[in-house]
Image (cartoon, rainbow, N blue to C red):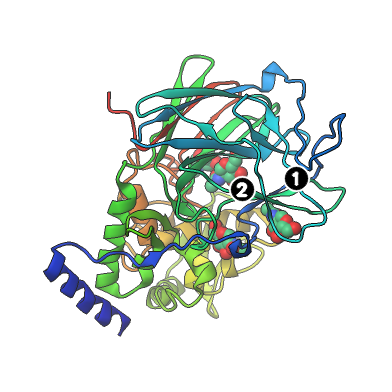
Amino acid sequence: MRGFIRLAALFALTLTTGSLAAPVVKVHPGGVHDIVITSNNTVNATKPAPATSSTGPSRIKAVRDVSTNGQLPLALINNLDGSVNAYVTGLSSNNELVMLQPNGQWYYPTADPSQGTPQPINANIAIPLGPQGSTTNVILPDYISAARVWFAVGELQFFTVYSGASNGPSLVEPSAVNPSDPSAAVNWGFVELTNTEEGGLYANISYVDFVGLVLGMSLLSEDGSTQTALGLQSDAVSVICAALAAQTAQDGQAWDDLCQVDENDNPLRVIAPGDFLSTNPTAFNEYFSEYIDAVWAQYENSPLTIDTQAAAGEVQCTVQNDLLTCAGDNRGYAKPTASDIFGCNSGPFAILDGDNAVHYAVVPRLCAAFDRSTLTLEGGSVQPGLSSADYYQGTPTNHYSHHVHMHSIDGKGYAFAYDDVNPSDDVNQSGVVADASPQVLTVTVGGPSTS
Ligand SMILES: *[C@@H]1O[C@H](CO)[C@@H](O)[C@H](O)[C@H]1NC(C)=O
Ligand SMILES: *[C@@H]1O[C@H](CO)[C@@H](O)[C@H](O)[C@H]1NC(C)=O
Ligand SMILES: *[C@@H]1O[C@H](CO)[C@@H](O)[C@H](O)[C@H]1NC(C)=O
Ligand SMILES: *[C@@H]1O[C@H](CO)[C@@H](O)[C@H](O)[C@H]1NC(C)=O
């Protein structure tokens, strides 16, 4: 029914405008009471902000000794014709909440214990990038973890909430899944990074939750080599929104609702289906049901081999009494739901305390095989086994992940939680750059430089 109505609407629109139907979720940015606090848009410090000698305003600004070892130079290239701000959020090596100020020093946000609602951070924490084509150099003054470098065409709104005297404040970040978030109408994105003394730098561009402002990364190492994750093509959000609308016209599923548009119908971001389901739980309801039945039927009769790519080697799995059961695994797998498949962390794909090494290895490989719909393909009885050329060729599949990879310049980047599962001889799609002694991390905003 839904599909039929959408199809009819699409034809009507195609006739009148000659283009695809507009996507349907329009953002309506709200205020502090429209913020939805979840584990996905908070960073919780375990230590309060360091005290300064003077008491006074609730916003404490502290200057600390900076260890040169922990410094990380960032080169931020603006390829957009617009005014872009960068923001850095994360936890210091002492687990204090930090943000970077334009003067290169950490700012330590605080929270007023007497306030029940999120409190806006009003300090000067926006770092303006130079005009189109320019590079803005900033230095992270010290080690940082759970960090994000945010970019926005305009300004983002960050908040804190008080979480007890012995903890630091919680940072409340813009949330892509909430169309009423105070920052919802702003085009933004981020790269995630952790830079510690023990582990060095580990940075990624993640599309696990959404695709927004287009970003790319390149990391220069001490030996002069570089690692890159080029990110998406500059018009990726519009192109993916159009592809998802076309998919909805074909199968009637809520793919087009993954696209959020501003008040002028310009696409702002595309939400991952798992995240969309967290606020729209009935979407994609029976989407995988027939496929799951076919998978279960196939592996009742012949084994599915999971290559753990670890000490356990290849393990054989078969369906017995409706449970997929793998040799050496401490427990079996019930049929997943769409939400389990998109999120890879619930139902049969939840990893519990006490699960053994085989279980830890099977969950990502099995979930990745569902998202990529490779389980009933020829050669699909060994997972991982088929090359990335075979991913997403079956139906049903994770069309979000498919289109994100199609419009990624080098095909890299996590589009679902276990996107780093690949055959050992295939390219690692993860889009991570990492180095023990990083020299410069370059982030490009708005698509790759053309020169
Ligand atoms: C941080 O704390 C808040 C409230 O205290 C909680 O809702 C949220 O899930 C926590 N975030 C994380 C990442 O654990
Ligand atoms: C991306 O990097 C951050 C920071 O290092 C890390 O917490 C997160 O788990 C990474 N995400 C993925 C999908 O690897
Ligand atoms: C957090 O995001 C994940 C997807 O990355 C989603 O599965 C989960 O439902 C979200 N949790 C909340 C509390 O919104
Ligand atoms: C791909 O790279 C990521 C990040 O370095 C790593 O965590 C993951 O284990 C790699 N995957 C494979 C199959 O080698």
Q: Considering only vertical position in the picture, is 246 above or below 132?
A: below
Disc 1 Cβ-to-ligand 1 distance below 8 Å: no
Identify residue for label 1: 45
Identify residue for label 2: 158
The front one of 377 and 186 is 186
Classify residue 404 as left or right of residue 309. left
- In the rendered image, residue 243, in percent from the top left (x then y), is placed at 27, 59
x 72%, y 34%: residue:
92
Three-letter amino acid code at disc 1?
Ala
Q: Is residue 5 visible?
A: yes
- In the rendered image, residue 171, in percent from the top left (x then y), is placed at 68, 48
Q: Residues within 10 Å of mark 1 (few under 14, many from 20)?
A: many
Quick one: which residue is furthest to the front in this view?
56
**What is the quadrant of residue 133 in the picture?**
top left
Q: Secondary structure at mark 2?
A: loop
Query: Which quadrant: the C terminus?
Result: top left
**What is the quadrant of residue 261 in the picture?**
bottom left
Q: Secondary structure at mark 1?
A: loop
The front one of 253 and 402 is 253
Q: Nearer the viewer, mark 2 or mark 1?
A: 2
x 65%, y 57%: residue:
39
Q: Considering only vertical position in the picture, is 368 above or below 229?
A: below
Q: Considering only vertical position in the picture, is 417 above or below 434?
A: below
Q: Residues within 10 Å of mark 2 (few under 14, many from 20)?
A: many
Classify residue 374 as left or right of residue 140. left
Query: Which quadrant: the N terminus?
Result: bottom left
